[in-house]
Image (spheres, rainbow, N blue to C red):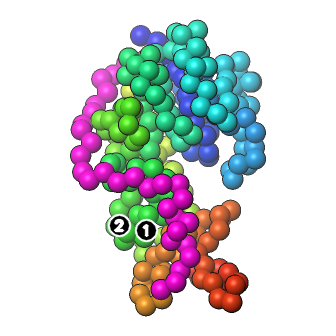
Amino acid sequence: MTRRILFLGQKPIGEKCFNIVLDQQCDALKICGAVSNITDNKWWKSARIYEQSKKHNIGFISNEARNNEQILDLIIKEEINTIISVQHEWILPKRIIEAVNGSAFNLHMAKLPEYKGYNACSFAIINGDKDFYTTIHIMAEDVDAGDIVIEESVRITSDETARTLYEKISDLSLICFDRLVTLLKNNEPIPTKPMVGESRFYNRNDLEKIKNITDFSDLEKVGRIVRACTFSGFEPAYFSYGGIKYYISPNA
């Protein structure tokens, strides 16, 4: 069986995973389509998946909008039978997952189902977790749901910031992703286990509500919030006085 891949993704981790698949292409594994950002006006300042797709003549769809019909058309045209998603912008509808007979995999850099949604690195620090996970799972109709294929973890140190944790879990995620690609390329059985635990979804704007620190009675908690909001290119934690924002950062 030849795995004919549709790759959906963005951000630094998505671009690195795309390169892993590119490098491992062979008779048994081929990228037949990609969906990603088409401009570099993002916080990571890159559109490498788009550029690589043009270079290798891979069918490309912009992710600036959902474009579900274009994706379905590409799946049919290119006889795509496998979807891989890494930081894709949109939730895929059931009909797209069914178009590849459920052979759809998503890399989510957090423990599931406890950390669905956005800014998981930050909330793991705020919640005082000792470990942080990356998860590859079978995609389902619901967001960040479906059986787990690969799950690994790193320790969260006492001085961890959102940025340093993101870098650590990105490195581990690439190792896990390479394992997935090897399984697909070799047509090996995909190991799965049910997703269990209390489900929680973090919205895109939930972190913004926490950045404005108004209570300094628990300095340990304040420290966690400050570290959780430390990520270059994004607004850090702050307090307001006299109509002025005063930003707070850890002494690193």
Q: CA distance from mark 1 to mark 2?
A: 6 Å
| Residue found farthest to the front | 243
Left or right: 54 in relation to 156? right
Name the spot of residue 145 as percent of width and height, x first. Answer: 35, 39
Quadrant in the rendering for residue 73:
top right
Residue type, mark 1 in image: Ile
Residue contact at pointers 1 and 2, CB within 8 angstroms: yes
At horizontal 47% and vertical 22% (from top left) the residue drawn is: 96
Dot 2: what SS? loop
Which quadrant of the rendered structure holds the N terminus?
Answer: top left
What mark, if any, has residue 129 been given in the picture? 2
| Residue 84 against residue 171 in the figure, above or below | above
Is residue 250 visible in the rendered image? The answer is yes
Name the spot of residue 185 as percent of width and height, x first. Answer: 44, 21
Left or right: 31 in relation to 215? right
How many circles with numbers are drawn on the protein?
2
| Residue 36 against residue 98 in the figure, above or below | below
Name the spot of residue 214 as percent of width and height, x first. Answer: 52, 84
Is residue 184 visible in the rendered image? The answer is no
Residue type, mark 2 in image: Asp
Name the spot of residue 209 as percent of width and height, x first. Answer: 52, 68
| Residue 147 against residue 55 in the figure, above or below | below
The crowd level at tag 1 (other Cα within 10 Å; few <14, some 14-19, many 20+) is many
What mark, if any, has residue 125 been given in the picture? 1
Is 164 inside the magenta-drawn segment? no
Dot 1: what SS? helix
Quadrant in the rendering for residue 11:
top right
**Main SS type for the magenta part?**
loop
At horizontal 35% and vertical 62% (from top left) the residue drawn is: 131
Give the magenta range: 186-215
Is 203 inside the magenta-drawn segment? yes
